[in-house]
Image: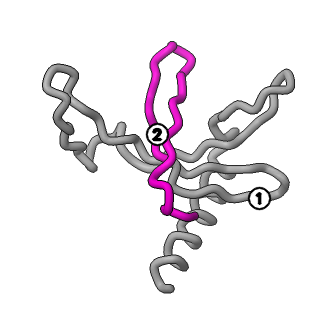
Amino acid sequence: MSEAYGPDFITVTDEDGNEFELELVDTLEHNGVTYHALFPASQEDEESGEPVDVDADDEEYGLVIMKAVEENGEELLSTLDSDEEIEEIYNLFMERFFQEEDE
């Protein structure tokens, strides 16, 4: 993935109406489905506008994997359907990340 134009950010809304900004890290196609690897975007303090340190140990911080699904002719991002799918796609992304590191 080219970083020539800077990172890509996606805003997603959960089922409770909460919005989250995620940074797109990588995309892969597997069995005809497009998967996206994302990390929570760094946040800014609402009053000062200064970046807020993200605690990498926080359970809300970490790799987020979503898949593209088409619903009523519109492409949406969705969570994965099963633990098996999560594990399989997670492993594929990890292989890609480590391959890129080795190059």
Looking at the rendering, which quadrant does residue 72 occupy?
top right
Q: Is tag 1's residue or tag 2's residue first in the polypeptide sequence?
A: 2
Q: Residue at 53% of width from left, 67% of height from top?
A: 94
* Furthest residue toward left: 48
> Would you say 60 lies left or right of 20 here?
left
Q: Residue at 44% of width from left, 47% of height from top?
A: 39
> Would you say 29 lies left or right of 94 here?
right
- Tell me residue 69's x, y (percent): 76, 36
Residue receiving disc 1: 30
Dot 1 lies on which element?
strand
Looking at the rendering, which quadrant does residue 96 occupy?
bottom right
Q: How many numbered marks have been drawn onto this rendered protein structure?
A: 2
Q: Residue at 86% of width from left, 26% of height from top?
A: 73
Tell me if residue 12 is in the magenta stretch.
yes
Mark 2 surroundings within 10 Å by alpha-carbon count, few (fewer than 14), some (14 through 19), many (20 or more):
some
Q: Amino acid at mark 1?
A: His
Residue range (magenta): 1-23
Q: Nearer the viewer, residue 86 or 24?
A: 24
Residue receiving disc 2: 22
Q: Amino acid at mark 2?
A: Leu
In the image, residue 95 above or below residue 77: below
